[in-house]
Image (cartoon, grey):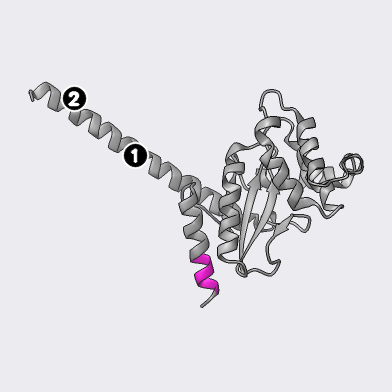
Amino acid sequence: MNSKKITVITLVTIAVVAFLVGMNMYQRSVHKAQADKVSQFESSLVRAHSPILGPKDAPVTIVEFFDPACETCRAFYPFVKDLMKQYPDDVRLVIRYAPFHQGSDQVIKLLEAAKRQDKYLPVLEMVLAAQPAWADHSNPNVELAYQAAAQAGLDIKKALMDAQDPAIDGLLQQDIQDLMALEVTKTPTFFVNGKGLPQFGSEELAALVAEEVAKSRK
């Protein structure tokens, strides 16, 4: 191998290492900034209206800022459910809304209306299952989400009327204010007992949950 090739390889290696170091530093700075925001706006993590899945008095709380049209939220949902099954008495999930995609606000209001019929969870899961059909980000077909909700047993006519209640719009606006205060910019964004993930990923979420569960059992 001649010296020119060695030089090129060396420069590429240096560039890759510098990029990785830079990314790591950036992620750390974002994580610290968000941690500062959480400590400043701690009450913004969980509100009285927030849907809770799992034991209400669980010592470990996963807060998820969630968009029903978000593919990654849909992909993470079974993983989060498995974590809750792994720790059935220790972990609860609090859902906060982040309507970043077109049409999401309408589906969120439908989910909140489903609470009034005690159908929140089945409607949530059916809407997520049908997400590929309705959640085209440029041209969502929310009517298909409504049809999915009806298949979950929701009285869709009543739910659509309830969804127009100003109280439901008010809680959605509260969630939007909170995500802005916490500088949440993407979905899903997770906090575990108020701590953000050091890096986004299922392994990182599982590790932080396990750490918090272990602390609660001491």
Q: Residue 74 lies in magenta, yes or no?
A: no
Residue 162 in the image: state x and y as whole percent: 90, 44
**What amino acid is at disc 1?**
Leu
Q: Is residue 12 above or below residue 205?
A: above
Q: Residues within 10 Å of mark 2 (few under 14, many from 20)?
A: few
Residue 104 appears in view: yes
Q: Which residues are magenta?
A: 211-216
Q: Secondary structure at mark 2?
A: helix
Q: Residue 214 lies in magenta, yes or no?
A: yes
Residue, disc 2: 8
Q: Is residue 163 left or right of residue 71?
A: right
Residue 20 got which mark? 1
Residue at 70 percent across and 38 percent down: it is: 99
Residue 109 appears in view: no
Residue 36 in the image: state x and y as whole percent: 55, 53
- Quote the CA–CA distance across marks 1 and 2: 18 Å
Q: Is residue 150 left or right of residue 205?
A: right
Residue at 80 percent across and 52 percent down: it is: 119
Residue at 55 percent across and 73 percent down: it is: 216
**What amino acid is at disc 2?**
Val
Snapshot quadrant of residue 136: top right
Residue 80 got which mark? none
